[in-house]
């Protein structure tokens, strides 16, 4: 750039000379800007190069190896969990007691440094059941069970004294307390912790194994995989009861999300789907308990939601996925669309282009949500009246504006596609105005999928289709516990401590809302 001291006398210059001076200085400024931009790019390039060199110096040269190991670990988890789940229903008692005797190692004693809690289980009889004679000590059986309580392990020693009759020498002893997994060393608290860590806190089993090792407890990943499979089998009747409750609703929220699944024998992943169905009528003041049921399928064919919803009659609030069309065909299920999906398309347009059309669409839709905030929790009839008086005119105006705007846009523009998406579902979008039980959007279903999305980032994928089905079952129990205000780990601990001995024809007693009062009482006593 020309410095101040080198500038000629500007008053003496004519118009052409002044113009030439300005052009020269402008060219110097442009050159300087280009140099600065080039320097910034070079800095970023050097940063990336240095980071790569550091990884090569201090880490492994191939990042693919870490991913391959994770794939194998997850695949093993699913295979061993499936093996344990199948063994739980095997009629062969040998298969039930040891899923793979040739592969099992001798069980090591539980670590001596862990705190022991002794529970003595005395027989109910106070006298000999045969002759009525007095009982005297004769010996005892001792077994240990590894348990988890918040923040630490402990070992529960179960002692069953043997008593013998002084008169006829009959031996009397209490029956061994049942365990969630037959002959398993894990207590219900530890099993609940493993399940919640895997499916709620997104920690794969091999990572949990590393964490427990820091406490001096060696829990092999394959052992925990068998626990997951055993728990899945044990919880099947409860998951089915949860499904029946959800499908008994008059209105459901539905959605799905892709989940990568390892394809057996290929070392690659395929795309499965997790479907969520949410029953939640609290926004209109209903007191019936909310719940969520998940289902896994290996693909996204429309036959799957049709099968899931074959017992459901009412209104389904979902996105515009064409696979739901077959569900609506016979009129048994009515369609209610999602305004949030409409809004999202305009939001993306505004973020990308600061489009004036997108901005106005967002402002018009926002006015509808203001009304929804005001009437949340009111009765269905009151919500319907308010929507008829206030929301319907706004929607009719929005439709008219959409139609007018459409004629001014290119037929191939993104804004045109967003408007046509809304107009193509207009009757279903308007349905919430006529029914106070419905919501303006499908956010209840989308919220239920957040845990799946977070888990997908950590797991990378599920190890098999069977692993996807197990995940769906546990996601449903955890999600329903959260919807009812329960700590999912405390809930699963209580369920697993009871379910092995619980009558299957009363399995509904173990659903989250039926244990809520008891768990709240336990929590207050612990505090």
Image (cartoon, helix red, strand yellow):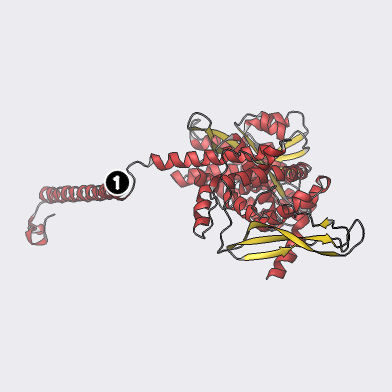
Quadrant including the C terminus: bottom right
Quadrant including the N terminus: bottom left
Residue in the image at 67% along x and 31% along y:
304
Residue in the image at 78% along x and 33% along y:
332
Q: Callout 1 environment at 10 Å: few (<14), some (14 to 19), or many (20+)?
A: few
Out of 361 and 231, give the one closest to the viewer: 231
Residue in the image at 64% along x and 53% along y:
186
Name above or below for residue 310 compared with residue 32: above
Q: Is residue 310 something one can see in this rendering?
A: yes
Out of 428 and 17, give the one closest to the viewer: 428
Secondary structure under the numbered disc 1 in the rendered image: helix
Out of 193 and 24, give the one closest to the viewer: 193
Residue 161 in the image: state x and y as whole percent: 76, 61
Name the residue carrying label 1: 56
Residue in the image at 89% along x and 57% along y:
129
Q: Residue furthest right?
A: 131
Name above or below for residue 355 compared with residue 10: above
When asked about the image quadrant of residue 472, the answer is top right
When asked about the image quadrant of residue 259, the answer is top right
Left or right of 519 in this view: 206: left
Q: Is residue 396 something one can see in this rendering?
A: no
Q: How many marks?
A: 1
Residue 514 in the image: state x and y as whole percent: 78, 55
């Amino acid at each position: 750039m020309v410095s101040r001291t080198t500038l000629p006398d500007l008053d003496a210059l004519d118009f052409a000379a002044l113009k030439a001076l300005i052009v020269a200085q402008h060219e110097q400024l442009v050159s300087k800007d280009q140099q600065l931009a080039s320097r910034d790019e070079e800095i970023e390039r050097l940063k990336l190069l240095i980071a790569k060199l550091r990884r090569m110096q201090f880490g492994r040269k191939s990042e693919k190896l870490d991913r391959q190991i994770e794939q194998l670990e997850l695949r093993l988890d699913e295979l061993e969990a499936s093996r344990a789940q199948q063994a739980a229903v095997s009629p062969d008692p040998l298969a039930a007691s040891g899923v793979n005797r040739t592969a099992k190692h001798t069980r090591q004693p539980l670590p001596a440094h862990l705190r022991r809690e002794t529970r003595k289980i005395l027989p109910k009889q106070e006298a000999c059941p045969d002759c009525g004679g007095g009982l005297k000590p004769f010996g005892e059986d001792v077994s240990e069970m590894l348990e988890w309580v918040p923040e630490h392990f402990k070992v529960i020693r179960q002692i069953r004294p043997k008593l013998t009759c002084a008169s006829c020498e009959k031996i009397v002893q209490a029956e061994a307390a049942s365990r969630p997994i037959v002959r398993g060393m894990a207590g219900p608290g530890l099993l609940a912790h493993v399940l919640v860590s895997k499916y709620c806190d997104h920690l794969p089993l091999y990572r949990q194994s590393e964490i427990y090792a820091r406490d001096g407890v060696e829990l092999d990943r394959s052992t925990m995989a068998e626990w997951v499979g055993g728990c899945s089998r044990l919880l099947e009747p409860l998951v089915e009861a949860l499904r029946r409750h959800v499908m008994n609703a008059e209105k459901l929220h539905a959605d799905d999300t892709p989940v990568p699944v390892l394809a057996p024998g290929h070392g690659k992943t395929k795309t499965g789907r997790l479907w969520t169905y949410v029953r939640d009528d609290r926004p209109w003041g209903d007191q019936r308990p909310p719940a969520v049921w998940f289902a896994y399928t290996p693909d996204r064919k429309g036959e799957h939601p049709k099968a899931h919803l074959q017992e459901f009659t009412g209104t389904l609030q979902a996105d515009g996925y064409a696979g739901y069309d077959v569900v609506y065909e016979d009129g048994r299920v009515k369609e209610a669309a999602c305004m949030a999906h409409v809004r999202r398309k305009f939001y993306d347009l505004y973020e990308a282009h600061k489009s004036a059309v997108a901005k106005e669409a967002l402002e018009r839709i926002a006015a509808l949500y203001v009304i929804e905030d005001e009437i949340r929790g009111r009765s269905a009839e009151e919500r319907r009246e308010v929507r008829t008086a206030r929301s319907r005119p706004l929607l009719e105006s929005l439709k008219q504006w959409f139609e007018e705007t459409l004629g001014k846009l290119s037929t191939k523009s993104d804004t045109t596609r967003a408007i046509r998406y809304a107009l193509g579902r207009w009757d279903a979008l308007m349905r919430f105005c006529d029914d106070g039980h419905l919501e303006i959007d499908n956010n209840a279903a989308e919220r239920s999928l957040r845990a799946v999305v977070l888990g997908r980032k950590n797991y990378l994928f599920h190890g098999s289709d069977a692993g996807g089905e197990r995940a769906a079952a546990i996601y449903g129990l955890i999600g329903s516990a959260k919807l009812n205000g329960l700590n999912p780990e405390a809930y699963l601990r209580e369920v697993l401590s009871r379910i092995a001995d619980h009558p299957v024809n009363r399995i509904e007693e173990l659903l989250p809302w039926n244990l809520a009062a008891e768990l709240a009482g336990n929590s207050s006593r612990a505090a």
